[in-house]
Image (cartoon, helix red, strand yellow):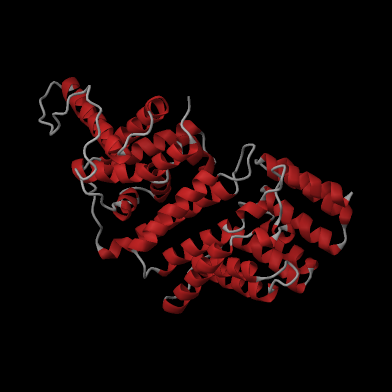
Amino acid sequence: MSLDEAAADLLRRLAPQMLGALVRRHGDFARAEDAVQDALVAAVERWPREGVPEHPAGWLHTVANRRYVDQVRAEAARARRERTVLDTTPRDALVAPPPDAERPRDDLLELFLLCCHPALAAPAQLALTLRAVGGLTTAEVAAAFLLPEKTMGQRIFRAKQRLREAGARFALPPAAERGARLAVVRQALYLMFNEGYAASSGPELLRPDLTRQSLRLTRRLHERLPDDGETAGLLALMLLTEARATARVGTDGELVPLAEQDRLRWDRAAIAEGCALVTRSLSTSPPGPYQVQAAIAAVHAEAPSAEATDWPQVLALYELLERLAPNPVATLNRAVAVGMVRGPAAGLALLAELESGLLAGHHRRHAVTAHLLELAGDRAAAAAAWRQAADLAGSEPERRHLLRRAARCE
């Protein structure tokens, strides 16, 4: 038997809470993270046979705490030294404590900021956050960084050891450090959402488990920091993007591009919430990259059709985004907007800037080139570019879509 989706989703929601509770109680992130992982494995093995416990959070907390104690005792025995550990629960009594035994507490912000400790390099901060708080497997984190799984496993292990050596505390850092740490937190959530919305590899286009988890964590972070404009912007961006998810996949699992989506299938409640969030955040705080991306998503969401999209406004927002956070992906997206406003030749001229660098061999650059060539009427060159993009795509649904576009141009 395997765990059903509802129980698996419950575990994803509870995992960060359990990790926060153990780190708060024992102060050792590395051991606590290992113990929570062991408890999750125990739940996956036992719950399908025995059923989900009446108090699943209490069950997980009990098992994780025992695993933590086991680690400490084993390490103490190996080192031939004694240590007093506050746990006297018999090993064979896997009964959850009463639901009010430990009052639930929202440790999410402290946990995020602990993973983004300045003792760690930025890549290690991101990797640890995605693994420990985001719930991604080591293999999934490795894929996001384009690294071998073994290399990423070593990086995460060293990050946990470094936190221990640095004496990192489970508490809010000084105000002067919070801005830099929060920037990494938001980036981790953004990467996690993107992997869920457009899987980098595999047979499925979407990973709803990742989009739900990243939305849930971002919403909780926004609740803790309601006046933080960029956190609000990130939540708005996720809501506005996820609102299109059901229309983005066809009946046979194929990718449906934005211009061809049935807008009646978009989630209007999510769009209304996202638009309200970004409007409020832009009116109360200076614009940041996530707020601007959310504003772009809002322009698309509010257009009654692809033809009615306010492309001049989209272009102006991409120009602002590049000033705030210059990066090749923003340039790539601006090229599309330039092509729609000033003509495909102008967009293709801008793409020439990306022929070297991070996107030189990326399938999305070739797909944008193909799109603009098709708009310009050069169907043969467009077909070749669509096929080149398909050869580079890692996602099977995306590859099939690109090949279909190539066939349309031939």
Residue 343 vs residue 218: left or right? right
**Residue at 46% across / 40% down in the picture?**
6
Left or right? Give the position of 236 relative to 98.
right
Does residue 293 sit above or below 170 in this rendering?
below
Determine if residue 329 is in view. Answer: yes
x then y, percent, for residue 36: 32, 36
Q: Is residue 323 above or below residue 403?
A: below
Residue 184 appears in the figure = no
Tell me the residue at 36%/35% (across/down).
157
Taking the spot 36% from the left edge, 60% from the top edge, the residue there is 180
In this view, the residue in front, 195 or 124, is 195
The residue at the point 52 percent across, 66 percent down is 274
Instruction: Give coordinates of residue 238: x percent, y percent.
Output: 52, 59
Quarter of the image holding residue 156?
top left
In the image, is 372 to the left or to the right of 162? right
Query: Which residue occupies the foreground of this view, 216 or 6?
Result: 6
How many marks the image carries: the answer is 0
Q: Residue furthest bottom?
A: 283
Q: Is residue 191 left or right of residue 384?
A: left
Q: Nearer the viewer, residue 207 or 367?
A: 207
- Measured as percent of width and height from the top left, residue 134 is found at 42, 46
- The image quadrant that residue 221 belongs to is bottom left
| Residue 142, horizontal then vertical, whole percent | 50, 39
